[in-house]
Image (cartoon, grey):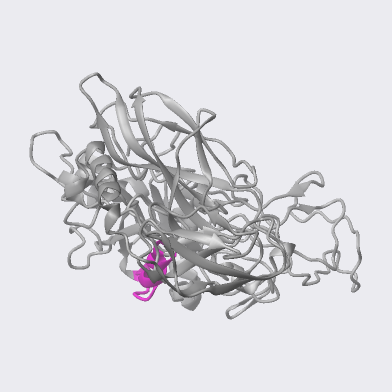
Amino acid sequence: MKTAKLILSRGDRKNLGVALKIIILAVVISGCAKKPILNSLDPSTGTPGTVVEVNGSNLFLADVKWDANAASEQSLPSNFLSARFFTVPLTASAGSHPVRLFGDGQYSDNTVNFTVSTGPIRPQPRLDDITLALFSIDASGKASMILMAHGANIDVGATMKVNGTAQSTAFSRLLRNTNMNATDPSTLGYPIFHYATVWTVLSDQTPGSTITVSIQNLDGGISNNLDYRIAANMDELDSDGDGLPDNWEKNGYDADGNGTIDIDLPTLGADPMRKDLFVEVDWMAAAAPNAAIWTDIESAFTNAPILNSDGSQGIAIHIDRGQAGAGGGGGTIIAYADRIRYDNSTPSAANTYVNFYTVKANNFNANRLNVYRYCVFAWDNGHGAGSSGQAENIWANDFFVSLGSWGADGTRADFQTGTFLHELGHTLNLRHGGFEDTNSKDNYNSIMHYGNDWITWNGQDNKFSPSQFGGIDVDCNQLNVDAVYTYSQGMRADLNENSLNENNGVCDAVARDWNGNGSMQASVSVNLDGNASLTVIKDHADWAKTKLNFRATGSGWGNN
């Protein structure tokens, strides 16, 4: 699928003036605009609020005409300087609506009909992330930038607000949510039809100050607020919000300040306009990782519903397990111990123990400390024998996978993939209930989820409940989760434990016999999560809430 991106090459990222000159130049050459050509619409049918991609040519400076050549014809907002995208009017009636393009003083020859269907429309927008491009501080000490807002269900034509004031806003990137293809959106609490990026030029800002950003859709629906702290200086600037300053990602990281680059981040693939996550992995020979897991782990981040300043999708995760080009250091075989802990305790004389931090001190290059998370594949968990892994804290930078003692199951790629992502998730600020330390939340569709009494263990059949071993459920048929290893997007509806409708289940009206009496009832009271009282349990937007910067205030990384 073709998408429009605001692409900023390294050579063009010098200052905001470059961007403004490009925009001015585009206006000056507008006389070169040509008669637009409309080939097709993608999709060609949908509910009001659907974002549509225009396939054609000569789209530069063209307009989209809805109900073309009819008395009700209207021009629709589109993306920056182009008719590439538009949002189906929320007032559009069901049925066929002719669409044409208009540019260079003339209509496109071709008319393509869009069929408006009935059904749920997108809910209010959700603001997930803020990033920057072309940040600069002028001689007077004021900051200018392109401020980018990324989130769910944002309209083409939506308005960004900064400290409550509407800004001139451009739409530049669309990412459709493919998970919506296998479920009925009317049964979800917050259906996400698409993700998008909008941006504005912001100037005369005070470095080090905090601004509050929100998004307003065409129908007036307002997103949540996000606070964003503007970099106090160029050394602090982190345009993509991954915890790695732009200077490190452009020029490399000088760990000891002696003028020599210790970690060549650009060569390792880091980019200041796209989120990067670095992890080093070592292991005990008896608990070595299955070589098949790395592709799935990398895919989970590459395919994450996250948009970046350069228009790319996902997080680039760089896992150094000793392979060529990874920088060296990972893939070290460490000495065997029965159990690994985050301290020097030895609870049982029958077992040998090793302190995780001792392993790290002996095998992890200290120059990497501010850049890399560290993972060890070990035999067993010294904090709880038989536990599959543990992170040092939530959130933090260290974790281990301890599946060696599990026998054949411990070598399974799915178990290792799920456990690695689960424990890594803890270092990204995710808990067993997403935002809370609660297990068995039936509507929490994440590998961070700890299962409930409906799980049965039989090979790969992890029934009913998303978990680190079975993966998430992508089609609402929780009778068999789908071995997709990722974090939740926060779409599932609330479940009120005081009044659960077993006929509705979690979604798609897949019935659930929560009280186990053999019949489906419209209202039952069941304690699903095991807390002291019955309550309303909620899904969580994991990807939107991850914290990549383990050095930030509030982290539990402990500077080690």
Residue 302 visible in the current orientation: yes
Q: Count how many numbered circles sit on residues in the image.
A: 0
Q: Is residue 175 above or below residue 219?
A: below
- The picture places residue 245, in percent across and down from the top left corner, at 27, 39
For the N terminus, the quadrant is: bottom left
For the C terminus, the quadrant is: top left
Q: Residue at 35% across / 51% down in the picture?
A: 275
- The picture places residue 174, in percent across and down from the top left corner, at 46, 59
Q: Residue at 46% across / 76% down in the picture?
A: 412
* Residue lying furthest top: 140
- The picture places residue 491, in percent across and down from the top left corner, at 64, 57
Q: Quadrant of residue 502?
A: bottom right
What's drawn in magenta, residue-wise? 286-302
Q: Is residue 444 magenta?
A: no
Q: Is residue 298 magenta?
A: yes
Q: Quadrant of residue 514?
A: bottom right
Q: Is residue 26 above or below residue 53?
A: above
Instruction: Give 371 or 166, whichever is nearer the viewer.
Output: 166
Residue 382 visible in the current orientation: no
Instruction: Give 121 or 91, whichever is nearer the viewer.
Output: 91
